[in-house]
């Protein structure tokens, strides 16, 4: 196995393309590996992150007429973008999706979706075998059971797929705080979606803006 290490292995927004797969009502109803609201929150954060860093994002569903539309939290971020509705279970066998990914000219392929063991694992494993640098965002994905999610992750790692969370991705894309063009948008995402850490940041801002008590008082 070739180990993923070194500076070049880190993800870069200018080389990344994101594919969000089947974040739909039917799949969410069958989710057993995570709290459903957590996956919705994390997927919304990931979607906003891609927009903030100008990362091309492909949205795709499967049999939406029966399985439901993509979460509103996703489509609200890209309101004018077509959602590609497939019949293929394996997104990487859908020519329209693959052609859109290839048209970006980018090779760092980032995937998140429902369910991990089916609609994430199949395209990730196939794309990795075709030479793509594939990363799966595990906390914006989920399986029917905890075991199904975890076994799928093990299977993908064995196939050479990289695993990350959305916050880890944010750190790699930002990389340097001197790079200020994305900081404002990133900060809003962290406040809205990072739970206690986001609230702690707001508290820190409050404390920094609190006037020092006057000694004369």
Image (tube, rainbow, N blue to C red):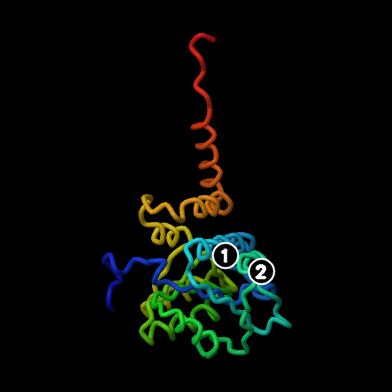
Point out the image quarter for the N terminus.
bottom left
Point out the image quarter for the C terminus.
top right
Q: Name which residue lies at 48% across and 76% down.
A: 152
Q: Name which residue lies at 60% across and 60% down.
A: 41
Q: Secondary structure at mark 1?
A: helix
Residue farthest toward the front in the current orientation of the protein:
181
| Image quadrant in which you'd find residue 140 | bottom right
Q: In the rendered picture of this protein, how many numbered marks are placed on residues? A: 2
Q: Position of residue 117 (x, y in %)?
A: 52, 78
Residue farthest toward the right in the current orientation of the protein:
65
Of 12 and 155, nearer the camera is 12
Q: Is residue 170 above or below residue 65?
A: above
Residue at the spot of label 1 = 43
Q: Earlier in the sequence, mark 1 or mark 2?
A: 1
Q: Is residue 177 left or right of residue 196?
A: left
Q: Name which residue lies at 69% across and 75% down.
A: 69
Q: Is residue 30 above or below residue 48?
A: below
Q: Residues within 10 Å of mark 1 (few under 14, many from 20)?
A: many
Q: Decide: marks 1, 2 in contact (CB < 8 A)? A: yes
What numbered label is drawn on residue 71? Answer: 2
Of 29 and 22, nearer the camera is 22
């Amino acid at each position: 196995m070739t180990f993923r290490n070194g500076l070049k292995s880190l993800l870069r927004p200018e080389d990344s393309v994101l594919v969000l797969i089947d974040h739909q009502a039917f799949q969410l109803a069958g989710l057993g590996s995570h709290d459903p609201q957590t996956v919705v929150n994390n997927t919304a954060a990931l979607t906003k992150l891609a927009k903030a860093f100008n990362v091309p994002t492909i949205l795709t569903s499967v049999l939406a007429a029966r399985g439901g539309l993509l979460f509103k939290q996703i489509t609200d971020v890209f309101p004018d973008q077509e959602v590609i509705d497939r019949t293929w279970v394996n997104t990487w066998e859908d020519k329209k999706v693959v052609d859109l990914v290839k048209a970006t000219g980018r090779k760092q392929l980032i995937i998140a979706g429902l369910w991990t063991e089916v609609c994430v694992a199949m395209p990730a494993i196939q794309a990795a075998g075709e030479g793509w640098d594939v990363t799966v965002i595990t906390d914006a994905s989920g399986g029917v059971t905890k075991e199904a999610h975890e076994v799928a992750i093990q299977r993908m790692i064995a196939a050479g797929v990289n695993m990350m969370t959305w916050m880890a991705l944010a750190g790699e894309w930002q990389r340097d705080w001197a790079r200020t063009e994305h900081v404002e948008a990133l900060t809003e995402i962290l406040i809205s979606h990072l739970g206690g850490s986001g609230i702690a940041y707001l508290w820190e801002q409050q404390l920094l803006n609190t006037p020092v008590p006057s000694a004369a008082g």
